[in-house]
Image: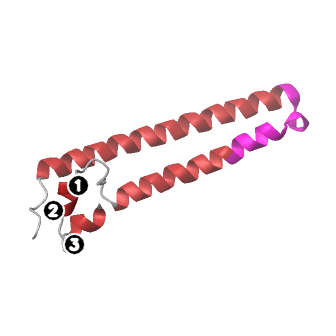
Amino acid sequence: MSSPPPDPAALAAAAAAFHQFTVEAFTLLAVGIAITVLRTFARVRFAGWRGLSGDDYLAWVAILFYIAETCLAYSVGNAANGLANNNMTDEQRAALSPDDPEYHLR
């Protein structure tokens, strides 16, 4: 049983949703980095470099993890062409043929 070819409107909607996700994810990343930079600048300005404490360094460690998480989320979404199976019914999943390229993307 082969599945019907993907609907162009559905593919366009998936591409638009992935674009929206990309803009949102990287905007939130930029805001997080900007706030951390401003926080660190303020701490250095008022307390000096020796006044930095563990939470200041942990904020930068968290930023590194946030960068990695955002990049991984983008690369997974990009590799799957914005497709996911989280909003598919069981019948739709069962209807996908293993020979269909969409089967491997979902």
Residue 90 locus on image (x, y percent): 23, 55
Quarter of the image where the C terminus is located: bottom left
The kind of secondary structure element at disc 1 is helix
Closer to the N terminus: mark 1 or mark 2?
1
Spatial CA distance of label 3 from label 1 is 15 Å
The kind of secondary structure element at disc 2 is helix
Dot 1 crowding, Cα within 10 Å, few <14, some 14–19, many 20+: few
Q: Residue at x 82, y 40 (%)?
A: 54
* Along the viewing direction, whichever of 62 and 51 lies nearer the viewer: 62
Q: Which residues are magenta?
A: 46-61
Mark 3 near mark 1, Cβ–Cβ under 8 Å? no
**Residue with the mark numbered 3:** 98
Q: Which mark is residue 99?
A: none
Mark 3 near mark 2, Cβ–Cβ under 8 Å? no
* Along the viewing direction, whichever of 76 and 47 lies nearer the viewer: 76
Q: Check disc 3 and give the amino acid type.
A: Pro
Residue 103: name its quadrant. Answer: bottom left
Is 51 a magenta residue? yes
**Residue with the mark numbered 2:** 95
Quarter of the image where the N terminus is located: bottom left
**Above or below, comparing residue 22 to residue 78 in the picture:** above
Q: Which mark is residue 90?
A: 1
Residue 80 locus on image (x, y percent): 33, 60
**Above or below, comparing residue 97 to residue 28 in the picture:** below
Dot 3 crowding, Cα within 10 Å, few <14, some 14–19, many 20+: few
Q: Check disc 2 and give the amino acid type.
A: Ala
